[in-house]
Amino acid sequence: MLDFIYYPVSGILWVWHKVFGAIPFLGPDSGITWALSVVFLVFTLRAVLYKPFVKQVRTTRQMQELQPQIKALQKKYSGDRQRQATEMQKLQKEHGFNPIMGCLPVLAQAPVFIGLFHVLRSFNRTGTGIGQLGMSVEANANTPNYFFSVEDVQSFLSARLFGAPISAWITMPKAQLDAFAAYGPIPTVLNIAVVAVPLMIIASIATHFNSRASVGRQSPEAAANPQSAIMNKLALWVFPLGVLVGGPFLPIAILLYWVSNNIWTYGQQHIVFRKIDEEEEEKKQAAIARRADNAPKPGARPDLTKKKKKAATATDGSDADNEPEIVEGIVEGDISDQPNGDGSASKPKPGARPQSNRGKSPKRKRR
């Protein structure tokens, strides 16, 4: 049903097993070879998801920057859910914000986790529980497992990591542990716990510190959001505790996956965050430099040349349509229109400015 996930995961694991198995001092049957194959399967996935992870970080920061506007829209359209959703989409579109990019890396890792769990469990199909095939020890050892041949399956069964098969888990039934008998000593619960428990503790601590680093990058406004506060508590305490509680039920290889994934995440977060901080600092300094270039120098008078050019442009013929209209009619008492004694209109003296009585009440003539 999920072969489109199982085959790619087993294919990448197979390639890394062949790479490390070719190293002389390791060999294909070494538990370290199989452990490194799992670790580099994780690294391969995370390298492919590097760019989506960077976009996730940018999306998270952008979401924090848009929180005040989002809250304003929620408050403004609190009674109209449809209008609120429409305005939210407009806001996201204006700022190029895509919420899906914030979830893509996590969504992409989930199928790999499921695929790896299934492929590792399929190396030992002697169980009779849910999803198990109930094969005999001999039939299991002579049945291929996706990309892995019969020889690869037998190599996996004979591999030990400090005395424990990497597909075994602490609560594994004894009937399934017997499947390893033909290819080495039957592992005990103590053998498995010696390897699994330290990995559980490391995975739990690494999960906590990765969550702490992520929460520490949040803005005060985002951290004050009730939903964000709940998710932060889950990430800081519940998820790490879940690794400890669920560890006894997980194969050693899955614990290796968890540890290596957290190690990669820890390093990648610091690299990406530092890079983004440097980019934002460069943008900030560039903006300050532009403002400094446009500002007048200390003690210098502002340059009025541009203003004079604008004024000259406004008074030429091209702006004739924008000139104020002359009010028709003569206001009684206007000096320029008052008749002289000989009946002719008085004219202003050469060089004198025309006077206007606009705004003043006209004087009445005495009879």
Image: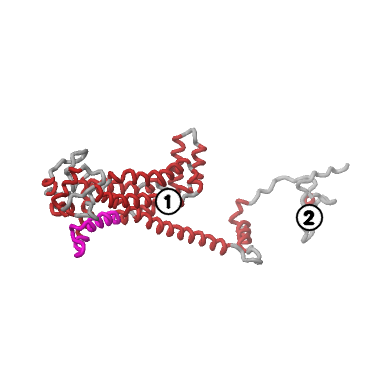
Q: Residue furthest right?
A: 367
Tag of residue 214: 1
Question: x%, y% of residue 52?
Answer: 35, 52
Looking at the rendered structure, which numbered label has been put on residue 91? none
N-terminal-most mark, 1 or 2: 1
Q: Is residue 276 left or right of residue 157?
A: right
* Residue 95 placement (x, y as % from top left): 45, 49
- Name the foreground residue: 34 vs 183: 183
Q: Does the magenta portion include 25?
A: yes
Marks 1/2: CA–CA distance: 85 Å
Q: Position of residue 232 (x, y in %)?
A: 43, 45
Per the picture, the main secondary structure of the magenta-coloured stretch is helix
Taking 187 as reference, is 349 left or right?
A: right
Residue 296 visible in rendering: yes
- Quadrant holding the N terminus: top left
Q: Which residues are magenta?
A: 19-44
- The residue labelled by disc 2 is 347
From the viewer's perspective, tell me whether residue 237 is left or right of residue 313: left
Nearest-to-viewer mark from 1 and 2: 1
Residue 145, how many percent across, how many down? 17, 49
Q: Is residue 12 magenta?
A: no
- At label 2, which amino acid type do we have? Lys
**Label 2 Cα neighbours within 10 Å, binned few <14 / some 14-19 / many ≥20:** few
